[in-house]
Amino acid sequence: MAFNPISGKSGSVQIGTVSYAFKKWTFNMKTNTPNVTNFNGGGFRQIVSGITQGQLQIEGPYDQGNMPLVCGNSYSFTLTWTMGITLTCTAIISDMTPELDVEDAGRLKITAEVNGSFTAAVV
């Protein structure tokens, strides 16, 4: 397979139908693995695939008046890697952290917990 890296400059964040001017996103996908080790396991640990969950973290410059987001509300998120490669889910904003530094622009950090099904994979 040929090496095919992508650039972050092709990314984007869309919430609902609106594109937001964020700088960075991460999407942590995790499946817990319950331990089902038993006497018949031949001395080896046995696990099964459990509940899959996801968490988004988005951050970037605060766009005053153009980011009407509410902590505790559910939104449809589309995180774009490149044209045609996206991660989409519905998530509830669990944490919003606005920050301001006299020597920098105002920033906004958002954490959202995926609610419901999503494709926990990358291609």
Image (cartoon, rainbow, N blue to C red):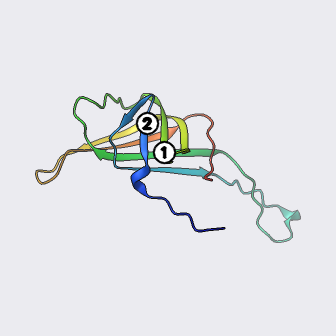
Cβ–Cβ below 8 Å for labels 1 and 2?
yes
Q: Position of residue 114 (x, y in %)?
A: 53, 38
The one of 6 and 55 positioned closer to us in this rendering: 6
Crowding at dot 1, Cα within 10 Å, few <14 / some 14-19 / many 20+, comes out as some
Q: Position of residue 53 (x, y in %)?
A: 58, 44
Q: Position of residue 110 (x, y in %)?
A: 37, 42
**Seen in the image, is 56 located left or right of residue 107?**
right
- Which dot marks residue 80? 1
Residue in view at x 28 percent, y 30 percent: 66
**Seen in the image, is 16 located left or right of residue 85?**
left
Q: Residue placed farthest to the bottom in the image? A: 43
User: How many marks overall?
Assistant: 2
Q: Which residue is mark 2?
A: 14
Query: Which amino acid, mark 2?
Result: Gln
Query: Which amino acid, mark 1?
Result: Thr
The one of 100 and 40 positioned closer to us in this rendering: 100
Q: Residue placed farthest to the right in the image? A: 40
Residue in view at x 45 percent, y 29 percent: 16
Report helix, strand or loop for mark 2. Answer: strand
Circle nearer the N terminus (1, 2): 2
